[in-house]
Amino acid sequence: MIYNPKSDAFSKPAPTKFDPSVHLSLTGELPKQTTFEELGLEGASPLSNIAITEPFHLFSKEGVRELRRELFSDQVQDHFLVSRKSSAIICREFPATAAPFIHAAWNSPEVLSAVSKAIGVDVVPCMELDVAHVNLNFPYTNEGRAAIKALPLDPAPGKPQANKAELEAASAANMGENAIVNWHNDAYPIVCVLMLSDTTNMIGGETAIKASLSVIGPSYGTAVAMQGRYVNHTALEAFSAGERITMVCSFRPKDPLLEDSTDIRKLHSITKANRMNGQVASYRMEIMAKRFAACAAEIQNKMAALPLDNDLDGEGGEEVVKAAEFSSWLKSQVDFLEHTRVQLMV
């Protein structure tokens, strides 16, 4: 049993420990990538030129089964289920104590490497509370947790529809209107959207990009990586599917010197204040500490490299810190702190 001090309760660990050789289905090949230039959004992101990828193999059937097992468990569904009228049922914020397999999987070097290579920049999960944001769309949602817990570990495909062409036209016509998730930009710089449902006979349900009105539909166990903070997108209405469940892991750049555009204010209404404030403050201060340490090291190295006769005339020697440039850098750090301040839930 695992003790969770936040809830003062015990939760059962996952029956299976994450094993990349069993639970992943990586091919080692890069997925097809769409650049910002191709979307008419040149220069939209400071992180990389890759806006979104085609679906790529990420989790095996065994891996998806374990993700679903933990997602449907009592310790997750009884404490971390959120309902929202404008979207599918949402399940999020569950910590590693409640979902050890899910957290181990998304934090594994193999998954981080696959997502980093796919999107063109090294990434790490932004915060524990959004390691796995799950959107659940399926019939009988009015039955709540009981209906979710009753879903099978191995999803069945939806029934083939005789009016397939009509439904495809309806899905396209309703783009952004009756969507599972409406047009939006994500709160986080980079996301990886994993399909946990069998999409064999699903009509619609794809991710649509507003800049090009193109649609991308991952299948069971495959994922799409996207710079969702910089790409306006939606999840289309799904027809003839018994369920549509996606798990979204949110990432930020691993390099603390790169821009972190995370803006979680839109998530305040579905997030616990103390949990969010603690995690936001922690990771943002960690970034700030690393930036100042890197800046100090650079200045110290420049000073150490000065020749011994640098200041023989007593005039101060060679310029080590360019005042205007350093002032501008300090201003950007003040802006970073101010952006952090407005993220807090008060």
Image (cartoon, rainbow, N blue to C red):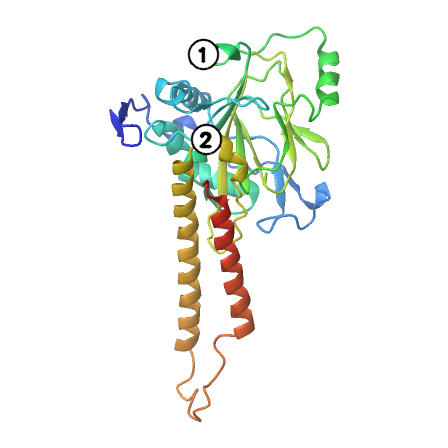
> Compared to 38, does 325 lie above or below?
below
Disc assigned to residue 152: 1
Q: Report if residue 203 is visible in the image.
A: no
Quadrant assignment for the C terminus = top left
Residue shown at 46% from the left, 11% from the top? 147
> Compared to 305, does 159 lie above or below?
above
List the residue tagged with mark 2: 132
Please state the horizontal and vertical placement of residue 169, each as a whole percent of the image.
75, 17
Quarter of the image where one finds residue 68 = top left
Residue shown at 67% from the left, 7% from the top? 161
- Which is more N-terminal, label 1 or label 2? 2
Locate residue 44 relative to residue 343 in the image: left or right: right
Please state the horizontal and vertical placement of residue 255, each as a whole percent of the image.
47, 52
Helix, strand or loop at label 1? It is loop
- Closer to the camera in the image, 15 or 137: 137
Q: Amino acid at mark 1?
A: Pro
Please state the horizontal and vertical placement of residue 19, each as a whole percent of the image.
36, 29
Residue lying farthest front? 346
Residue shown at 52% from the left, 44% from the top? 262
Q: Report if residue 278 is visible in the image.
A: yes
